Image (cartoon, grey):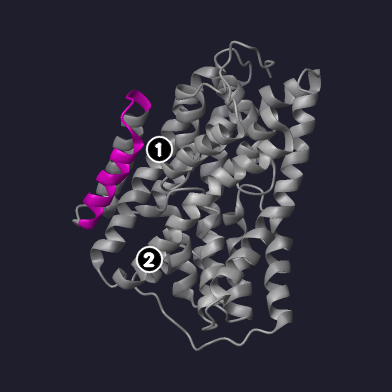
Amino acid sequence: MNSITSVQPRPQTLTELFLGFSWLALQGFGGVLAVAQRELVEKKRWLSRDEFIEEWAVAQLMPGPNVINLAISLGSRYFGWRGAWVAMAGMLAFPLVIVLILATVYAQLAHLPAAAGALRGMAAVAAGLIAATGLKLAPALKINVLGKPLCVIAGGGHVCGRGLAQAALGRGGARPGGARLRSGLAQVARMTELNLSAGDWLTLFLHFASLSLLSVGGAITTSTDMHRFLVDRQGWLTDAQFNTSVALAQAAPGPNILFVALMGWNVGLNTGLPWAPAAAMVLAMVGIMLPSSLLSYATSNWSHRNRHLRGVRAFKQGFAPIVVALLVATGWVMASATGRTLDHWPLWLLAALSTLVVWRTKLHLLWLLGAGAVLGALGWV
């Protein structure tokens, strides 16, 4: 990675760092990645295009939310451990408040088809945003020997692998997504009040902490185990509550890790105790975030100190084509989740148009997400 020079813009204070990541997160409906590239590389220029790919390569390999790992890495790069935690706080603070408000409002509107339609339209746009981010980063691979071949292999492998996994899950039964997610959007079921002991509260924290270091690629990769624990084994959540937590986090601004906060919040709501929702949310979020964030901080520090080593440079350059390929492929996979058949061609068209607009123009992402919400609410996609 290139060393930081006096010419390159950088955050001057911790307050600027916090506000920068807060504004970034508040624009990130359906995930922050597409906005992160535009804000950090194109607008603020805190990172060059090559540096962004290199930092993202490390963030991808670490357990925990990728964008949180990126925030920790960039914050520690400029301000050490204080910058790491301030950047992470900026990514989470305001979006957490908004997603709780959104969940409260959605609970009152879940029976309306327009509400589910708006989420569906925003999800299609979000798929386009992710794919466009990969296309915008692709020019950085021109001088990379492995660039195009490795990019094609990695992207094709990712799409095929996800397709085979979805086919296997479809044959094997239920999973926390797909058809059950769509059914969960139609209802927000409540259950009889829970009576949690002190041991239960500790179990809640320890379970999420145990998943933290396994969540390579983001906490969503461990959602199957979360469903098995919270719904099937403990009975602390209903299927509808679980699925709606995932869907609302996708539609709300900020990192998708906030679905864990909503799950904790709903567990607390099901106890009927006034203080329990906040307590369960904190336990779930600290559990899923703390171990992976500590590891990410240690790894990013080592990477920054040793960025001039040949092995470190070779690793980052070799992983760069995979990063670009996975971004484009993830957009395809997300679009597949919203429109699996030709009957859903309007969703595919919306995702494709979003990709093209973000790739070739500088139109603000919020306009696209708003358009997707309106088209979905009207039932046009």
The quadrant in which residue 13 appears is top right
**Looking at the picture, does residue 276 appear above or below residue 370?**
below
Query: Helix or strand or loop: what does disc 1 sit on?
Result: helix
Which is more toward the observer, 291 or 118? 291
Quadrant including the N terminus: top right
- Where does the magenta region start and end? 359-377
Q: Is residue 57 magenta?
A: no
The alpha-carbon separation of the residues under discs 2 and 1 comes to 22 Å
Lower position in the chain sequence, tag 2 or tag 1: 1
Residue 316 appears in the rendering: yes
Density class for disc 1 (Cα within 10 Å; few <14, some 14-19, many ≥20) is: many
* The label number, if any, that marks residue 129 in the structure image: 1
Which residue does the numbered mark 2 point to in the structure image? 182
Q: Residue at x 62, y 37 (%)?
A: 70
The reply to whether residue 328 is visible in this rendering is: no
Q: Is residue 369 magenta?
A: yes
Question: Residue at point 49% right, 78% down?
Answer: 238
How many numbered badges does the structure rendering display?
A: 2
Name the mark nearer the viewer: 2 or 1: 1
Is 4 situated left or right of 270 in this image? right
Most common SS among magenta residues: helix
In this view of the protein, which residue sits in the foreground, 31 or 313?
31
Q: Name the amino acid type tagged 2.
A: Arg
